[in-house]
Amino acid sequence: MLDAVDRTTAGERIIASKAAPRGLLPMEARGLTLAISGKRLVDAVDLDLNANSITMIMGPNGAGKSLLIRLLHGMITPTSGSITWSGEQLNEGMRRRQAMVFQRPVLLRRSVAANVDFVLSLRGPTDKAKRDHILEHVGLLEHAKQPARLLSGGEQQRLALARALALEPDVLFLDEPTASLDPASVLRIEQIVSSAHASGTKIIFITHDFGQAKRLAGDIVLMHRGGVLEHTPAEKFFEKPQTAKGADFLAGRIVL
Amino acid sequence: MQDFAEAFRLAFTLVLSGDPDLLEIIGLSLRVSLSAMLISCAFGLAIGATVAVLRFPGRGAVIVLMNSLMGLPPVVVGLVVYLMLSNAGPLGFLQLLYTPTAMIIAQSVLITPIIAALSRQVLEDLYSEYAEQFRSLCVPTHTAIGALLWDARYSLLTVALAGFGRAVAEVGAVIIVGGNIAHLTRVMTTAIALETSKGDLALAMALGMVLLTIAILVNASVMALRSTAARHAYA
């Protein structure tokens, strides 16, 4: 799967986005601000996500990336500004069509299978065949009866992804899901993410890994001090960033 | 007065011979305290889980109150329950005073705050771990509470056993509402108090040994449960 992704350019991937978007796009954020104790952690962000590409959010630590995706997912309420998905204000129904995987997977104190069953039960009767299919897809079927917390780090993150994908989300938010994983585990995660994207899921992915962004991204959102510095197709971004700070970021210079 | 060794010897004889009076007292003690534990778990776990998950004005004060009530003096609980159940009290028509049911009520009142406060802490710790994932999944509150209770079951068993330990070792409340009536409301702790005051140290000692054995078994069960849970990475 990943080989196939690697042979195409990011631009081609946007154009040839294989499956039709599932209906929540476009996303529009206008003047999105989150202030805590008077400090604007997300500062008047305007952002449009139209294409069903993999959107990578990048930027230095503390730039507000994680807060931005939590705002877009409706997990936290903005101080001001608006978010619309497919022209409507973000609501509970839309949130149920989204899923998120965190940097540190939060697994229930249950077996691997029971972790997937739990999320399936949130949307209807538990479907054992569907659960087994998902676990097979992420390569964890043989671990189905094991306690989830005994899995390796990479396996735990794949289980977190399996749980998110069990919801068949229109939009999947990934908050540095491959941070601190070994290269083989990163590859497996990227394969699963690419596969989800190929089936029509909009991916919004935070990463610090330039190589990963080059491999997967259709477009890059570069954040700095709570604001969006630029939102650029990935190829263009890596060829010639639109901002001086973007160039500094790519060159590895400290961006403060 | 019997000397200590003689008391011990007689106590062992009573325990090993399966003395019917002794067995009756032990049986009633276990029935009363286990019933109180189950009732307290039903209320205490529900209260603990609700306070752990919900955010509402005055929640901090509720937690302070719950924690404070863990130290309820048994004699005060006994007195309040006595007043409620006496003929002049609001529940006097039930005619429960000096019955095992009155003792169960008193012990339940005594240990419900313990189970509520300890389970609140256990569940809140777990909820802080799950909260973000639950918010992302739009998990309804009642489902979140159910999931927390299930996933924390080993720790909650420890909490329940702590409540049982407190109930079975308690004397002040049950002696007030039960009256320590032979063959009716006499439990291990009240019998120990009575027999000691009468100078029958053998029976008191035998009951004390049984009480200690139960305490050891409860603690051993807690340790076994926790190590099993840890071994399976569920705790």
Image (spheres, rainbow, N blue to C red):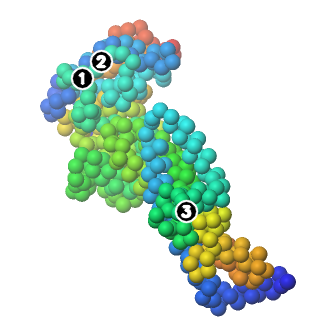
* Mark 3, secondary structure of its residue: loop
A1 and A165: which is toward the camera: A165
Chain under numbered label 2? A
Asked if A48 appears above or below A160 in the picture, the reply is: above
In this view, the residue farthest toward the front is B88
Whole-percent x, y for residue B139 in the image: 33, 42
Q: Is residue B7 in sight in this rendering?
A: yes
Whole-percent x, y for residue B213 in the image: 65, 75
Residue behind mark 2: A82
Residue behind mark 1: A89
The mark found on residue B74 in the picture is: none
Asked if B184 appears above or below A101 in the picture, the reply is: below
* Residue at point 79%, 80% (across, down): B199
Task: Look at label 1 and name its amino acid.
Answer: Gln
Residue behind mark 3: B86
Task: Look at label 3 and name its amino acid.
Answer: Ser
Chain under numbered label 3? B
Q: Is residue A183 in sight in this rendering?
A: no
Asked if A76 appears above or below B181 in the picture, the reply is: above
Q: Are marks 1 and 2 in contact (CB under 8 Å)?
A: yes
